[in-house]
């Protein structure tokens, strides 16, 4: 396959409701799409991070430079471009997994479309629909939180995740348990907001029978997470700290996590995400698919991944309406608590030209052969 052109499309799409985490509040999905044009067809992908480096070190403006100046020249220098050859060609560029993932996914989409193969088939999916959880942000009051959770349960979501931070943890979890009962699949995500000195406090969550506590401590602190896990009966799940399959194997071996959040972008793309799944699954460690409030372009390939056999817990793969009044693809709609795995070639979706035009804030060319 020959790379002919790579276009960047910056989009800004209002969220239906602000999303507050321990590191900030988001009101708009502000990111870019990559559009790759090759001699065998075209592909699309979405960059997963935000304009500010708060969830992780990567950010929108930085990723554009990395793609244009460091990743695309290396990819274009290959005699022939393939998805399998992409990661090795980019390996000398340190880090920047989310930027690499965006490039790999667009190339993968183009390549699979040229074979007429759906991503789910390529990855080894065993389901054609996947159960949907929902991630509920930090709210101004417990009453507001209970209203939101109640609405999501009415819509059919099968698992609730509460964002927590110091000062918003035991009380909201207790309130949700009291109101919705002990059977509700419930988990929490701290996005690195605690330290090991908070271990005794976090132990108070053990009484609520949570599925997991996600990334309680600092990013990359595997040792600290292992020490914390010794003191908690709630399973620790890692998100920010896992950048590849090797990290995942190390974390499992150290008992730094008993559950794994797989975000393809965070590990450099779907090929590595499948390896993360394989490593965890081989050890009997459950995995689930994380989310970055993606548009349909990012959501579609996540649903394909979430259909692999080791994804035994519902993901943060919610319906389009949980995020946007209008998406840039055909919306993903919840049916009996599940979302369909796209069945078309490649990622199975494309931007709707009219919606894309309205949400586009800037377009540019990152490469022309
Ligand atoms: O996509 O529904 C979603 C959001 C899920 O909570 C979510 N993502 O740490 O797992 C996480 C966060 C990261 C994004 S916060 C802007
Ligand atoms: Mg998380």
Image: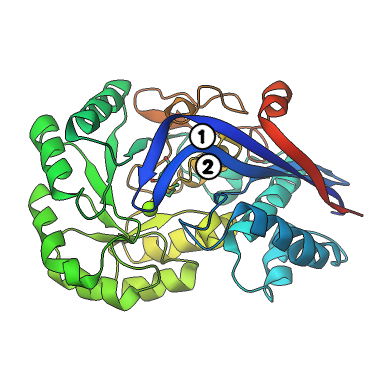
Q: Residue 93 sits in which quadrant?
A: bottom right
For image coordinates 81% across by 59% down, the residue present is: 81
User: Could you say where residue 144 lies in the image, as x and y percent from the top left?
Assistant: 23, 29
Question: In the rendering, which numbered label is found on residue 304?
Answer: 2
Crowd rating for badge 2 (residues with CA inside 10 Å; few <14, some 14–19, many 20+): many
Query: Does ligand 1 reach within 8 Å of label 2's beta carbon?
Result: no
Q: Residue at x 44, y 72 (%)?
A: 247
Which numbered tag is attached to residue 47?
Answer: none
Task: Name the residue: 19% across, 49% down.
Answer: 169
Residue 104 seen in the current view = no
Q: Which residue is mark 1?
A: 341
Q: Nearer the viewer, residue 326 or 311?
A: 326
Of 90 and 56, nearer the camera is: 56
Total numbered badges shown on the rendered structure = 2
Q: Is residue 364 visible?
A: yes
* Disc 1 Cβ-to-ligand 1 distance below 8 Å: no
Label 1 sits on a secondary structure element that is loop
Q: Is residue 18 left or right of residue 123?
A: left
- Within 10 angstroms of label 1, few (less than 14), some, or many (20 or more) residues? many
> In terms of secondary structure, where does tag 2 sit?
helix
In the shown orientation, is residue 224 left or right of residue 33?
left
Position of residue 322 measured from the top left corner of the image (x, y, whole percent): 42, 29
Work out which quarter of the rendered image holds the C terminus and state it: bottom right
Residue 112 position, x and y percent, is 71, 45
Q: Quadrant of the N terminus?
A: bottom right
The Cα–Cα distance between marks 2 and 1, rounded to whole angstroms, is 6 Å
Return the residue nearer the eye: 212 or 275. Answer: 212
Tell me which numbered mark, 2 or 1, is placed earlier along the sequence: 2
Q: Which residue is found at the position 71% from the left and 63% from the top?
A: 66
Q: Position of residue 2 (x, y in %)?
A: 87, 54
Looking at the image, which residue sits at the far right? 369
Q: Are marks 2 and 1 in contact (CB under 8 Å)?
A: yes
């Amino acid at each position: 396959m020959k790379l002919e052109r790579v276009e960047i499309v910056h989009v800004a799409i209002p969220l239906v409701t602000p999303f507050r985490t321990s590191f900030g509040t988001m009101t708009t999905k502000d990111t870019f799409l990559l559009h790759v044009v090759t001699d065998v067809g075209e592909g699309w992908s979405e960059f997963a991070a935000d304009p500010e480096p708060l969830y992780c070190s990567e950010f929108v403006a930085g990723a554009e430079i990395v793609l244009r100046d460091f990743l695309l020249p290396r990819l274009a220098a290959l005699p022939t471009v393939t998805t399998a050859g992409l990661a090795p060609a980019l390996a000398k560029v340190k880090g920047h997994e989310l930027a690499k993932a965006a490039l790999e996914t667009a190339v993968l989409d183009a390549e699979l479309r040229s074979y007429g193969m759906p991503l789910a088939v390529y990855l080894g999916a065993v389901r054609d629909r996947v159960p949907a959880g929902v991630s509920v942000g930090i709210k101004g009051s417990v009453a507001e939180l209970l209203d939101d959770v109640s609405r999501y349960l009415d819509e059919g979501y099968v698992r609730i995740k509460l964002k927590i931070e110091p000062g918003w943890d035991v009380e909201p979890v207790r309130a949700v348990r009291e109101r919705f009962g002990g059977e509700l699949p419930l988990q929490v995500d701290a996005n690195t907001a605690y330290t090991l000195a908070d271990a005794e406090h976090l132990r108070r969550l053990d009484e609520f029978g949570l599925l997991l506590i996600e990334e309680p401590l600092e990013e990359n602190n595997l040792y600290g997470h292992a020490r914390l896990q010794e003191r908690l009966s709630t399973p620790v799940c890692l998100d920010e700290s896992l950048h590849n399959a090797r990290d995942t194997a190390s974390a499992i071996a150290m008992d730094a996590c008993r559950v794994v959040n797989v975000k393809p972008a965070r590990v450099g793309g779907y090929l590595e995400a499948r390896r993360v799944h394989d490593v965890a699954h081989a050890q009997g460690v459950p995995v689930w698919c994380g989310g970055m409030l993606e548009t349909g372009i990012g959501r579609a390939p996540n649903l394909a991944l979430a259909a692999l056999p080791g994804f035994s817990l519902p993901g943060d793969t919610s319906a389009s309406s949980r995020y946007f009044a209008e998406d840039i693809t055909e919306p993903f709609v919840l049916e009996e608590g599940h979302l369909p795995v796209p069945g078309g070639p490649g990622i199975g979706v494309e931007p709707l030209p009219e919606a894309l035009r309205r949400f586009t804030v800037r377009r540019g060319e990152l490469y022309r052969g």
